[in-house]
């Protein structure tokens, strides 16, 4: 199954309402986005939209949440608004991928992503997606990050036909690395990138974890 092609039958835990004109959004100027709403035991994961901006502002305003991201500081509303547009655009690059906003009993808890690679050293776009997650601090250590991430891994392989899913974080970010391991990803490399404003721990580099479709099926 190629990335972006819909399977004949969708699992009951996904809701998808769209029509597909191509596997890549740039194949037609008016090609629609197609991103499923996903459910787990506790989470409802809905595609990111304009109405979710305030949640993103709240999330990125916490310096502890942002400790291992960017310059390690809380982000201004202006910065979040700009990034919000970039996040929305991710859903237009490859059909089925994008950002999901997570809710538990109607309460916002954070967001999860499956987005196509953006850097040349991340490999080809076709068949691959990068996994990510960011949660409000009050929902840490409740197993929600891994619960949502596990569902996105399932969705990527089972529904979207991906061949490889990877995730990246700072070497020193033990909590994020533990989540990657918990959902089946394995460490594949440690690498270094340029930081405009290096933060504590950046000298130890970044790590990439990944899982292939074959590894997921054999789990």
Image (cartoon, rainbow, N blue to C red):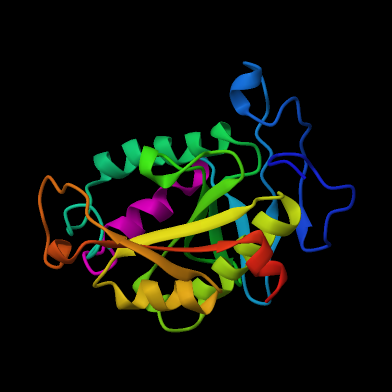
Q: Residue at x 41, y 35 (%)?
A: 85
**Is any part of residue 119 visible from this angle?**
no
Numbered disc total: 0
In front: 149, or 192?
192
Image quarter hosting the C terminus: bottom right
Viewed as shown, does residue 39 lie left or right of 94?
A: right
- Secondary structure that dominates the magenta span: helix
Q: Residue at x 47, y 76 (%)?
A: 181
In front: 57, or 202?
202
Compared with 100, 26 (above or below) is above
Compared with 52, 200 (above or below) is below
Compared with 110, 182 (above or below) is below
Image quarter hosting the N terminus: top right
Residue at the top extreme of this rendering: 29
Residue 28 drawn at (x, y percent): 66, 17
Residue at the right extreme of this rendering: 8
Q: Residue at x 40, y 50 (%)?
A: 54
Residue 199 drawn at (x, y percent): 12, 60
Viewed as shown, does residue 115 lie left or right of 94?
A: left
Give, as a single range, the part of the protein colored magenta: 50-65
Residue 99 drawn at (x, y percent): 52, 49
Q: Residue at x 39, y 52 (%)?
A: 56
In front: 181, or 90?
181
**Is any part of residue 181 visible from this angle?**
yes
Q: Is residue 44 magenta?
A: no
Residue 83 drawn at (x, y percent): 35, 40
In front: 20, or 118?
118
């Amino acid at each position: 199954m190629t990335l972006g092609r819909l399977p004949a039958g969708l699992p009951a835990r996904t809701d998808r309402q769209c029509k597909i004109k191509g596997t890549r959004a740039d194949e037609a100027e008016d090609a629609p986005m197609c991103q499923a709403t996903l459910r787990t035991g506790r989470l409802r994961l809905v595609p990111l939209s304009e109405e979710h901006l305030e949640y993103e502002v709240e999330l990125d305003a916490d310096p502890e949440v942002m400790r291992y991201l960017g310059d390690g500081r809380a982000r201004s509303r202006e910065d979040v608004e700009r990034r919000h547009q970039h996040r929305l655009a991710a859903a237009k690059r490859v059909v089925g991928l994008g950002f999901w906003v997570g809710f538990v009993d109607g309460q916002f808890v954070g967001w999860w992503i499956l987005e196509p690679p953006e850097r040349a050293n991340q490999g080809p776009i076709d068949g691959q997606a990068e996994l990510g997650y960011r949660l409000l601090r009050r929902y840490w250590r409740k197993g929600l990050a891994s619960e949502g991430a596990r569902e996105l891994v399932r969705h990527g392989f089972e529904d979207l036909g991906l061949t490889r899913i990877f995730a990246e974080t700072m070497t020193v970010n033990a909590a994020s690395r533990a989540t990657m391991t918990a959902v089946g990803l394995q460490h594949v490399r440690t690498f270094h990138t340029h930081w405009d404003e290096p933060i504590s721990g950046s000298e130890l580099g970044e790590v990439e974890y990944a899982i292939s479709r074959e590894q997921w099926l054999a789990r």
